[in-house]
Image (tube, rainbow, N blue to C red):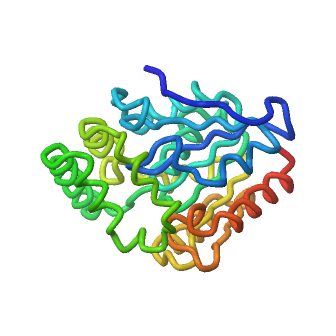
Amino acid sequence: MTLASERDGRPGGDGHPIVLVHGFGQNRRCWGPLAPALARDREVVRVDAPGHGGSAAVAADLPTTGRLLAEAGGSAVYLGYSMGGRMALHVAVHAPEALRALVVIGATPGIADDAERAARRDADRAQAARIRAEGVDAFVARWLALPMFAGLPPEGRFDGERRTNTAAGLATSLELAGTGSQAPLWDALAGIDVPVLWVAGADDDRYAAIAVEAAAATGANADVALVPSAGHSAHLEQPAAVIGLVRGWLADIGT
């Protein structure tokens, strides 16, 4: 199995390449201004996660996804948003030799409580069945109507790009790599020995709290940043702020 990807920017530029891993229901073309801004300084590798875009036929659980991402990106900084953040964390656990630094935007290390995780797994499976029954267009309309995406500007929705995904790919991704299927990684955070930046929108109460807690669990090599006036998709709601934050942090850690 291989993941579809595109490379842009400056190979051998100001540091290691940076691998971008998108959120659930998106694809590698859903990064808005962040990707070209990062490509000014270094090579950027935009990857289609398993079940999405050009990787729609790839069915992989999260440990396998971590290894597939490392194969696609090589020795690099890995930046993941939401589902992509959970996948990037699995690079840290299952392919740490590829990881030079890690940026996590609006993501969780997993659900620690067994009962809560089982309930989420059931909900993910029900969502997967509905996607298969109703198709991608209906899913995209329902998904983007969720309150967590209310802050997205029109140019950050990427409706057309999302609709190029397949129902089978999205459903399989939820079943194999949804939050309910993820073994929690909280205990593994302290073992990540590269710089880590935990980012969340300041208005995204749930994930802002997770970012603060996860940074504390990661240890002295972790930083946390809460983006003002941003919800779950901070890099699309406040792109200039996140671009400045990520580029500044990368410069500070010397990648």
Determine the residue positioned at 59% across, 79% down.
Answer: 229
The reply, left or right, for residue 11 in relation to residue 223 is right
Q: Nearer the viewer, residue 95 or 246?
A: 246
The reply, left or right, for residue 75 in relation to residue 123 is right
Determine the residue positioned at 42% across, 68% down.
Answer: 149
Determine the residue positioned at 49% across, 44% down.
Answer: 87
Q: Nearer the viewer, residue 117 or 83?
A: 83
Determine the residue positioned at 68% across, 60% down.
Answer: 219
Image position, residue 150 (x, y; %):
42, 73
Question: Do we see residue 183 in this rendering?
Answer: no
Image position, residue 7 (x, y; %):
66, 31
Question: Do we see residue 197 in this rendering?
Answer: yes
Residue 62 quadrant: top left
Image position, residue 185 (x, y; %):
48, 51
User: In the rendered image of this protein, does residue 32 appear above or below residue 212?
Assistant: above
Image position, residue 192 (x, y; %):
65, 47
Q: Nearer the viewer, residue 106 or 190?
A: 106
